[in-house]
Image (cartoon, coloured by chain):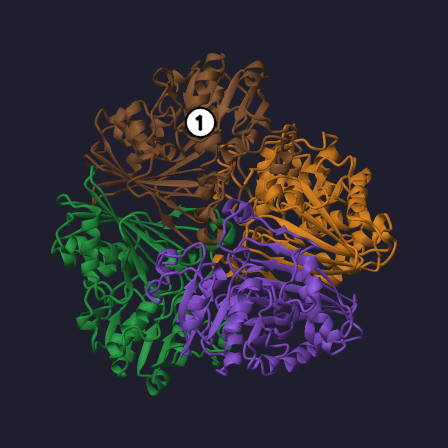
Chain colours: A purple, B orange, C brown, D green
Amino acid sequence: MVDVAIVGAPGYAGAELTRLVAAHPELRPAQLTSTTDAGRRVGDVYPGLAPYVDAVYVEPDVAAIAASCQLAFLAVPHTAALKLAPVLHRAGLTIIDASADFRLEDPSVYEQWYDVAHTEPDLLAEAVYGLPELDRSRLRGARMVACPGCYPTAALLAAVPALEHGSADPGRVIVDAKSGVSGAGRTPGPGTHFPSVSESVAPYKVAAHRHTPEIAQGLSAVTGHETRVVFTPHLVPMTRGLLATVYLDLTGPISTDEAVALYRERYRDEPFVTVHDAGRMPTTLEVRGSNRAHIGIAVDKGAGTLIVACAIDNLVKGTAGQAVQCANIVLGFRETAGLDTPGPVV
Amino acid sequence: MVDVAIVGAPGYAGAELTRLVAAHPELRPAQLTSTTDAGRRVGDVYPGLAPYVDAVYVEPDVAAIAASCQLAFLAVPHTAALKLAPVLHRAGLTIIDASADFRLEDPSVYEQWYDVAHTEPDLLAEAVYGLPELDRSRLRGARMVACPGCYPTAALLAAVPALEHGSADPGRVIVDAKSGVSGAGRTPGPGTHFPSVSESVAPYKVAAHRHTPEIAQGLSAVTGHETRVVFTPHLVPMTRGLLATVYLDLTGPISTDEAVALYRERYRDEPFVTVHDAGRMPTTLEVRGSNRAHIGIAVDKGAGTLIVACAIDNLVKGTAGQAVQCANIVLGFRETAGLDTPGPVV
Amino acid sequence: MVDVAIVGAPGYAGAELTRLVAAHPELRPAQLTSTTDAGRRVGDVYPGLAPYVDAVYVEPDVAAIAASCQLAFLAVPHTAALKLAPVLHRAGLTIIDASADFRLEDPSVYEQWYDVAHTEPDLLAEAVYGLPELDRSRLRGARMVACPGCYPTAALLAAVPALEHGSADPGRVIVDAKSGVSGAGRTPGPGTHFPSVSESVAPYKVAAHRHTPEIAQGLSAVTGHETRVVFTPHLVPMTRGLLATVYLDLTGPISTDEAVALYRERYRDEPFVTVHDAGRMPTTLEVRGSNRAHIGIAVDKGAGTLIVACAIDNLVKGTAGQAVQCANIVLGFRETAGLDTPGPVV
Amino acid sequence: MVDVAIVGAPGYAGAELTRLVAAHPELRPAQLTSTTDAGRRVGDVYPGLAPYVDAVYVEPDVAAIAASCQLAFLAVPHTAALKLAPVLHRAGLTIIDASADFRLEDPSVYEQWYDVAHTEPDLLAEAVYGLPELDRSRLRGARMVACPGCYPTAALLAAVPALEHGSADPGRVIVDAKSGVSGAGRTPGPGTHFPSVSESVAPYKVAAHRHTPEIAQGLSAVTGHETRVVFTPHLVPMTRGLLATVYLDLTGPISTDEAVALYRERYRDEPFVTVHDAGRMPTTLEVRGSNRAHIGIAVDKGAGTLIVACAIDNLVKGTAGQAVQCANIVLGFRETAGLDTPGPVV
């Protein structure tokens, strides 16, 4: 058993990590830290976790974490990981960072979009982007992993195969995404107040969301081009789930069946990706509570457009599950360890 | 007071029409017909209408309708209006048809998408498309009005000004739309079963929805071009509301503020359209229960893309409210009569 | 037209009052005040109200209110009305208070449950309880009206007829109530955060909610007894709506039909109350957006228990609509003025 | 590994059983039967199960089931189990029946409430009621288990300790219950249509629900009395979850802390029951997706009433999880096998 720390444990990402680690055959939650809930029992904050995690949130203490853990999951807001990751890394821990701080390879892009200096360029250079379906080779044995954002996870899984294969124009990709409210985290605010969300579909941060450069970075790496990303996130009235509907300009004629075959070939060995038959689209409900990504494809021949939809659970494949998947690879465990149960059927 | 018939009155479109007509200063519901609920009291089907509409649904009977009504709202499935409209029209009634049967000018396009022959080409030729914001001149005094579908209403209001002005490329328009479940009507089915819809965002009929040619027809009329429409509808877990997010290729540089000004100029005299300030996007919640269309605009300069979102209530501006708005114009009433109250604040 | 002030206008109760007053044939919103949103346009806070209310929230200023208004609706938290009501009253205004400050006749009960001194016993003595269905005689011409809480409105409408008639034991009444989230107001918090509310039924303040003594007061007045009230409110995942399920011990045999007849007789002339046929129960959906109270009744003969369910919209009959209904009575208008439109059908 | 059949596998109860059995360390799904979906792949009906259950639904065939399985879960409508259970039982299988057919000990009570003759009195006499928390002794080695209904599960867990202990009057118990929509099953209908359910709390079958005699039977067994049960189920707008709020007449003074202690003592060794501290009530969200029952308690001293709320997931502890728990006991496995993972945190 590997003892792990979850830093920022009572947030939604941290709590899902706690749930997954508690049920994981190889990991054990040794430190659950929180600056806001330190001193409270896990079960007081999440009564559903009480029978499985008999622990108290503690203030994050690097020495204590280093003394008891081999790996740390960081489920903290951006800039907090900038401070924590280097110290824990120097203390010898493996870091699986779910924050945005080490996702963007170019520190100046980070600084432009997050409006704060990137103070750890060396660790950034070492960081491996934690989307195993794109490239898991560098993850094996990595000591600093930057897990993707929830939107980039779905957008990249949807867009990469067609771009990689040259079937789609690398110039511009449109991503219209719909997310459940848990993506906004556990802290209440006007935008997550039940009466404001219910019966409301709301675009937000249109052409201005911080996941845009991350999607662009992932696509550009594949296309060898500066691929422009138009990204429109929408909040929809549900707790979990994220669907990215991606529009790509076809470079030549291709049928829906051929596109499905292309995607299936690309994801043939992926344990968590399903590509649906032509005519079937994924729903967020069917992946709820699991680490799966389900993809549906349609070609609009007349318009020369490829439409790819990818559904994930934003808190699992979009955050905590992906972090565990990365940890499994990094540590040499079976990649699906602790992630191989289906979600509730409805 | 003008006596009207509502044909297909217990469906959602018909019931909203009943509600609006009951509160209308100039219209009176004289015949509420239904093939499935004939004999039941309105208040047994909709207890909330009981105190306002003391009536019984009756079998649709053309002679009875003609004898007592001057105008008929058709809230029936497609093909049913093909049969009813000509008879009522010959009997001297004005027809406001909420079905799809008289929306597509070219009968062969209708036949291709609806897979049934169009048997009324003459009446089709007379029919006026009932989206007043595009062209209300032909509606005045019209006797046969084809009200738009809910998706085309939002898509056209979002796309037309930029295309009309030449700011956007007329070749292809992408419409990513999100609708509440009431758009699927009152008849239960697997796709509208509560546990299947809750926590689910679901694309459906991708690149195959019957509103596609209707949107294309409206845009092509404006661009003078065969404009291709990529249309992806999604079902989201809410009862009412429809948001169309439209992606247009800019023909030249334009700022968001300039685009907002262009849209405001276009809709300056429209009583039901609001164009939000740059930085604000519409939500379906803010138009719920009203006949309004709210529009938000963002320009993605780097990608050369104009993003326009339009929110409506699918059962009001998307169906019943628009039908009443058309009836007001046709009959020479104040256009906002019976439609000038705000919806509930949440 | 009577010019009115709405104090606390951007809260949900205030915003619904704004909506109702804007559409009212005899009332005009002259002052919309707010300590938190002063300076903002109404339409910035509620885009759906923008086309109907072209106004800016202002700081509450008694002199300004008194100079321009004849009546003030107070949509403020408890204790705030204690301060405002006497000043406005002395300035000659009629007060319709939606807060809890003047509901409990006995100041010591107020002090016990609200944990603060009641500083206005004289005005309290003058205040008339604003549930017209119980006794509208004292409301005519009243200058100080205390509108009931949302739970007491539903509970009293459900319980009073049977108790009044002697069909039910006056000793103890059980009220199990279910409310939508808007009842908690517009301020976000952990208990109204979308992910915490969705898929959750949550009892709260069990045997400790402040509406308990208000229900007891209303029932005791009718029974001439100190009637004990067991009151369990539950939060359910919806925005609007309140259902009180009330359990009464029968004093003798009575059939469901007889109980229905008794309730119908009691509410025969009430414009906003419907008593359903035996076998039909009310739902919150059927009263959503309207000022109606719908009641369903069942007798469990074997157990000697009368079960009465009453559904209201917590923001209309439960708050803002009831305040307008009281204003109509106080000012001598038609009681249904501004309240006589059905809510959306779904 | 024990091979099991799930009869009625594509219904919600059957699908949750499929999910639980697929992840169970000792059980293996050998036959998944369906009369309506025979021939379809499991993953076509439930795409989320596809990666875990590579199987096709087959017509229920007793010989095939008997040849390959040792145990059969029956997830069928009432009367269907009456036909299947005896044949499978004679074929040597152990039966875990989730239907209502073998729950009521007295066949005449069954006949009165289900309006059909009970044709299997002998097997009924052998059947053991599958609520392990009440009495698991008879379950060990049983061959015919009748799993409780979802409502009785929550109601009995809430009411039994106080009645058993003599703290509450055995004469009458009031159960006000709130259930998510999945309790109505997978077949769509007017009452489960999304627009009819959303924003609606709806009492149904008041004083007439078929779970009433089952609750009464369970309580009467404990009280040694004919305990009358007043039972009011409500449908609330959520997919999963069931909360029973139970009202008991206290026989003497008891504090909330004492009642909590009594319940904790009663459920001390129960692996799936949590009794909350005084002041905390359970929510359906906290048990969602798990086999847990969480209980909260409040005493209303003045009214002499004990209020106990019990939250379960209607599809897990209320149906499929309980069936697996019973199977574990019957087969001699660890009682929590396959049920010991927490549900998603939101």
Q: Is residue D165 left or right of residue D12?
A: left
**Residue reaching furthest to the bottom:** D67
Q: Is residue B277 left or right of residue D51?
A: right
Q: In this orientation, which residue lies closer to the viewer: D150 or C269?
A: D150
Quadrant where the image shows the N terminus of chain C:
top right
- As displayed, is residue B335 above or below residue B179? above
- As displayed, is residue D309 above or below residue B70? below
Q: Residue at x 35, y 45 (%)?
A: C204
Whether residue A155 is visible here, answered yes or no, is yes
- As displayed, is residue D270 above or below residue B263? below
Q: Is residue D172 left or right of residue A132?
A: left
Q: Which quarter of the picture shows residue D153?
A: bottom left
Q: In this orientation, which residue lies closer to the viewer: B296 or D61?
A: B296
For badge 1, the amino acid type reads Ala
Q: Position of residue B116 (x, y in %)?
A: 71, 61
Q: In this orientation, which residue lies closer to the viewer: C300 or B43?
A: C300
For the residue carrying disc 1, how many other residues have a C-alpha within 10 Å: few (<14), some (14-19), or many (20+)? some
Q: Position of residue A117 (x, y in %)?
A: 66, 59
Q: Position of residue A155 (x, y in %)?
A: 65, 67
Whether residue B148 is visible here, answered yes or no, is no
Q: Position of residue D232 (x, y in %)?
A: 31, 48
Tag 1's secondary structure? helix
Q: How many marks?
A: 1
Q: Which quarter of the picture shows residue A79?
A: bottom right
Q: In this orientation, which residue lies closer to the viewer: D110 or C202?
A: C202
Residue at mark 1: C80
Q: Residue at x 73, y 79 (%)?
A: A165
Q: Is residue B209 left or right of residue D202?
A: right
Q: Chain of mark 1?
A: C
Q: Residue at x 46, y 37 (%)?
A: C313
